[in-house]
């Protein structure tokens, strides 16, 4: 007996419920809203039941619609797992990888990972979203999100990548003119370029078990580490910078690390992805590349 339900109908019906609207489902699946509506109506006609209650302002699922939704999820998840298993056995990363990260870290580091990733794996393409909004990984179809800082508990899978470690840096011209500080307390006598997204800037520095806050008057308060690095490289003052951001300029002779025993408390960086699926080859390859990159810096 020929089935009256095709996989596209199940996929679209599931997307409508997940998105809460025909418009949202169309955006998720990159399909026209009218097509989505027609498919659902055709499915109801084939089955002879009402799956959704429609009004001009809302969309709700019927009891039999809920039953079909649960069955559709089971069927589609099983098919996706089968495809994923085949992809894992095949091993070669391929297809479109959707990545999201915060704007600054995306520009500072993730963009480099993407460049190396595309060079290493010719069968992949990348769609990157560098945004400071918190992206909904599940509903926006993101494969991997790079998050900086401590994570809240969630149902998503997490893979620690490494830590952002910081040091104090200045240009040799500045050091020659003002002298290199020998003690942390000497920073109060220097021009400081301090990062602060909001409020009063504070440097919380550690040396072993010692902890010290630096809250002196700043020459410049800025909310971007790239800009702080460039100001320090121009000889305007001392900045607290991620090592990976400062290291290239150290090699060029434009920055010098000072008070090397003191650093900021390291900040964790993690990759997150949906917990309902294992790490696919394209995601695993990207995450492994990121972990390897962290190992190249102090």
Image (cartoon, helix red, strand yellow):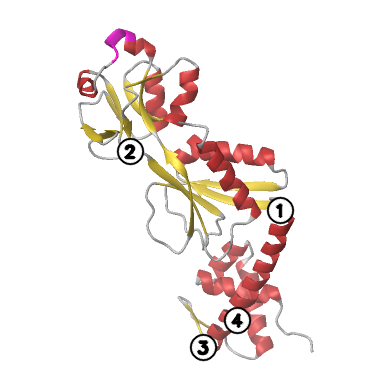
Residue 265's disc is 2
- Quadrant in which residue 163 is drawn: top left
Q: CA distance from mark 2 to mark 4?
A: 49 Å
Which is in the foreground here, disc 1 or disc 3?
Answer: 1
Residue 71's disc is 4
Q: Is residue 85 visible?
A: yes
Tell me if label 1 and label 3 are in contact, CB under 8 Å.
no
Going 70% across and 82% down the picture, which residue do you hit? 5
- Magenta segment boundaries in residue numbering: 176-180
Earlier sequence position, callout 3 versus callout 4:
3
Q: Nearer the viewer, residue 196 or 183?
A: 183
Going 69% across and 68% down the picture, which residue do you hit? 82
| Image side of residue 222 versus residue 245, left or right | left
Residue 63's disc is 3
Q: CA distance from mark 4 to mark 1?
A: 30 Å
Could you classify mark 4 by the number of other residues whose Cα lies within 10 Å: few (under 14), some (14-19), or many (20 or more)?
A: some
Q: Which residue is mark 1?
A: 91
Could you classify mark 1 by the number of other residues whose Cα lies within 10 Å: few (under 14), some (14-19), or many (20 or more)?
A: few
Going 52% across and 32% down the picture, which residue do you hit? 296
Could you classify mark 2 by the number of other residues whose Cα lies within 10 Å: few (under 14), some (14-19), or many (20 or more)?
A: some
């Amino acid at each position: 007996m020929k089935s009256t339900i095709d996989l596209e109908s199940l996929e679209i019906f599931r997307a409508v419920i997940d998105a809460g609207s025909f418009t949202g489902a169309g955006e998720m699946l990159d399909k026209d809203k009218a097509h989505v509506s027609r498919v659902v109506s055709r499915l109801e006609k084939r089955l002879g039941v009402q799956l959704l209650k429609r009004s001009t302002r809302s969309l709700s699922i019927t009891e039999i619609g809920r039953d079909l939704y649960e069955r559709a999820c089971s069927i589609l998840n099983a098919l996706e797992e089968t495809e994923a298993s085949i992809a894992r056995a095949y091993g070669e990363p391929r297809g479109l990888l959707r990545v999201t990260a915060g704007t600054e870290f995306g520009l500072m580091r993730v963009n480099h990972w993407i460049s190396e990733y595309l060079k290493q794996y010719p069968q992949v393409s990348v769609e990157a979203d560098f945004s400071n909004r918190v992206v909904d990984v599940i509903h926006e179809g993101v494969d991997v999100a790079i998050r900086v800082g401590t994570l809240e508990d969630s149902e998503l899978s997490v893979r620690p990548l490494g830590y952002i470690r910081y040091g104090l840096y200045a240009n040799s011209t500045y050091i020659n003119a003002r002298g290199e500080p020998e003690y942390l307390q000497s920073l109060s006598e220097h021009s400081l370029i301090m990062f602060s997204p909001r409020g009063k800037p504070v440097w919380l520095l550690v040396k072993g078990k010692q902890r010290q806050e630096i809250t002196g008057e700043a020459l410049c308060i800025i909310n971007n580490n790239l800009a702080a690095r460039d100001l320090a490289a121009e000889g305007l003052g001392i900045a607290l910078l991620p090592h990976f951001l400062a290291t290239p300029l150290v090699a060029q002779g434009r920055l010098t690390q000072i008070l090397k025993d003191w650093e900021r408390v390291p900040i964790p960086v993690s990759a997150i992805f949906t917990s309902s699926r294992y790490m696919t080859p394209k995601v695993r390859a990207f995450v492994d590349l990121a972990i390897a990159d962290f190992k190249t810096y102090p």
